[in-house]
Amino acid sequence: MMERNDPPWAWLKTPPPHLAAYAETGVWDERTIAQQAQALADAAPYFVALVDGEVTLTRAGALADAEALSAALHARGLRPGDVLAFQVPNWREAMVINLAAAMSGLVVNPIVPIYRDREVAQMLADCGAAALFVPATFRKFDYAAMAARIAADLPDLRHVFTVRGEGDDDYAALVAEGRGRAFARPAVDPLGVKMVLYTSGTTGRPKGVLHSHVSIARILRESAAHWGLAPGEATLMPSPVTHVSGYANGLEAPFICGTRTVLMESWNAAEALALIDRHALVGTVAATPFLVELAAAARAAGNPLPSFRFFACGGAAVPADLIPAANAAFAQCRAFRVFGASEVPLVTFGWPRDEALAAVTDGQVVDYDVRIVDGEDRDVPDGREGEILARGPGMLLGYADAAQTREAITADGFFRTGDLGVRSAEGAITVTGRKKDLIIRGGENISAKEIEDVLHGHPLVREAAVVAMPHARLGEGVCAYVIAMGAVSGEDLAAHVAASGLARQKVPERFEFREDFPRTASGKVRKDLLREDVRALLVP
């Protein structure tokens, strides 16, 4: 067997100092998801935990497959602490892989399917992944061939397994190989590293976010209580299960909250309508564009989706009129904005019972302590903009890199989100932009989001993204990237911004029209790439 190297997070203490107090107060359910799945399966083995097209997985069935896969992975030499990466679409196999890893004490590294050679190789190298699951092919892309190309430069990667492929190294063969094979499963520290998840990377190189077995579970339980999601109910999951939102609410919630997940391999609003009716689905957590399209499909079909109760949305700009307009299409569903990040999942849980606040804010803080601070880390009063800092039992252990961790977490345990926002007297958080998204024009700070909000008010603007561009005299100027819904010019939009009452220096000096924007897996606009684009247009 090859000698195993220590993971890059070997420096991390369990629990780290910023989480030690939570361990002492008993806020966590200190069980792994495999242990919780076993308890639920003992109580109701034939309850369907997952629906994947026409195929279902019961609790007992998922556990049996995971036990077999765990045994097969052990036979292949994987040991506690090894990193098991999986770049799998919204398929039922992802649930079993995740359970098997928890049983074996492996650290999972979920990778969204949109990534290709360079990004995947970077993530696998950074975390020292020992094994990787990929689809044989998916959407006409040969993932197995990609894995073979990058494996030669990844000395830690000892195994590449396929899903829905062929051969002895395919998922189905591994499960069959492990049936009836027993081994002494290790004791797993629930406060130790369970997952390394790479950030969406809207501003540059992704960072490896470390979560324990208890952090995601804490967020799931608290958010389910806030949204009124009960055991036995079913939710829709169209977001990638390898993104933090889809991973938590798609793969983990059935064994943490006792719910059922209905997967969508790819988003289609008409298909979502049919699934919601067929399975009496009660809600979802998904990107804002999905809400817009679902509401439009419901209106067009004359189907108000009577079973549907909540839609938690985020990841993209949300105009104030979107929430009430969407709610009007449904019989009882209430949409609301939420705010969080891979490092601090769901800092806010939304306002499911207050449409006014749900429409204009990014939610209610429930399970975190939040500070809004100025550039000197001094707290600012409610109503004043500052950087959002968050601390709570669902936050990250740290980054894989110790230096990045020290930079991101304050001495008193708060995570620096990099997001700017304000807090209201009601405890509502409204995100106003990114700290690094400020445009410094002639020494004056200009909020990109403020300009975007005005542009979104134009009837022919579907989406706008405002970024800094090089300016010979002022250092930075204002460039607006626009997805238009009809014939509109930059002059028209400049006049619209000027007529809004914004200061003249906030009127974009350049407009670039695009069919779509580069995005992360969660739908966030890659503004770093837009800044590179406009720089390339202006600088020879």
Image (cartoon, rainbow, N blue to C red):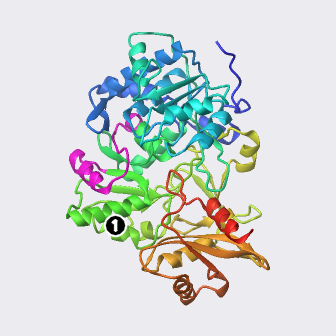
Question: Does residue 512 appear to the left or right of 242 in the view shown?
Answer: right
Tell me if 161 is positioned left or right of 304 in this view.
right
What stretch of residues is rendered in magenta? Answer: 254-282
Query: Quadrant of residue 441 in the image?
Result: bottom right
In this view, 26 is above or below 293: above
Task: Determine which residue is flagged by label 1.
Answer: 326
Q: Quadrant of the C terminus?
A: bottom right
Q: At 79% across and 80% down in the image, what residue appears?
A: 473
Instruction: Kindly give the residue lying farthest to the front in the view shown.
Output: 540
Q: Residue at x 24, y 57 (%)?
A: 305
User: The residue under label 1 is which amino acid type?
Assistant: Ala
Q: Is residue 267 magenta?
A: yes
Which image quarter: residue 290?
bottom left
Looking at the image, which residue is at 45% across and 17% down? 168
Viewer-proximal residue, 183 or 165?
165
Is residue 256 one of those drawn in magenta? yes
210 relative to 476, above or below = above
Q: Nearer the viewer, residue 105 or 161?
A: 161
Is residue 362 visible in this depiction of the protein? yes
* Mark 1 neighbour density, 10 Å: few (under 14) some (14–19) many (20 or more): many
**453 vs 365, nearest the viewer:** 453
